[in-house]
Amino acid sequence: MCVGQKWVLKMLFFKVGNKLKRCSVFFVVLLLVSCGGEVPNLITEGDQQIPVDLDKRETIFGTGEESGIWFNDTGPPSSEGGSGIGVNAFLWRASLDVVSSLPIASADPFGGVIITDWYSPPQAPKERLKLNVFILGRALRADGIRTTVFKQVQGPSGTWATAPVTEGTSNKIELSILTRARQFRSEALQ
């Protein structure tokens, strides 16, 4: 029993006469809840409590021994280009490089999502494009990336209306991202 708990017990045995003393005892009891001791590292599975080493448990950053607090900084980057981000680093860099001419509205390296804002090319001011790029994993593979292209055309009244995208546009963008990612990978291996 800690000193604070003994003091609270003494206070409780004295006749507490006014509301101020009662409130103060109540708050002191709340503050001293942490004097109880250590909490065991146990996980309950069914009716059993199983001891767990908290340093080796799995978190969103990996297992306890191999992951740092941020960005997996305890070891060298993997050969697949994973450098603490949730997706393949080569695909991520290549995607940013390919869409760099468009204004980027949102980029999430952990989720592998790049969303551009609407962009009107100078040669076609009444058309605008928007891209969503999704990196689907940590491997540098052809099926590891998916792009969606949106196109709008400005009508005579000035409002924007959805227009069909030329067939194969998404595939061409994906191919250019994959080509650039392979270039980044070959540069890194040299």
Image (spheres, rainbow, N blue to C red):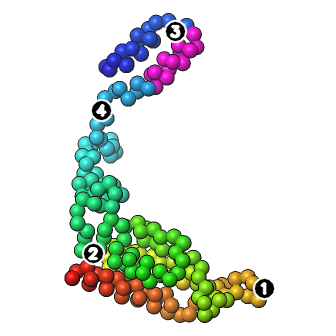
Q: Please report the bounds of the magenta region as a residue range.
A: 18-30
Q: Quadrant of the C terminus?
A: bottom left
| Residue positioned 51% across, 70% down in the render | 106
Of the numbered discs 3 and 1, the one sitting upstream in the chain is 3
Q: Between marks 1 and 4, how big is the CA–CA gap?
A: 70 Å
| Residue depicted at x 45% and y 91% | 172
Res. 37 in view: yes
Badge 4 marks a residue whose secondary structure is: loop
User: What residue would you read off at disc 3?
Assistant: 16
Residue 146 on image: x %, y %: 45, 80
Q: CA–CA distance between discs 4 and 2?
A: 42 Å
**Magenta span: helix, strand or loop, mainly?**
helix
Q: Mark 4 points at which residue?
A: 38
Q: Which residue is drawn at 31% across and 35% down?
A: 39
Q: Position of residue 98 (x, y in %)?
A: 44, 83
Residue ID for mark 2: 80
Q: Of marks 4 and 2, which one's residue comes earlier in the chain?
A: 4
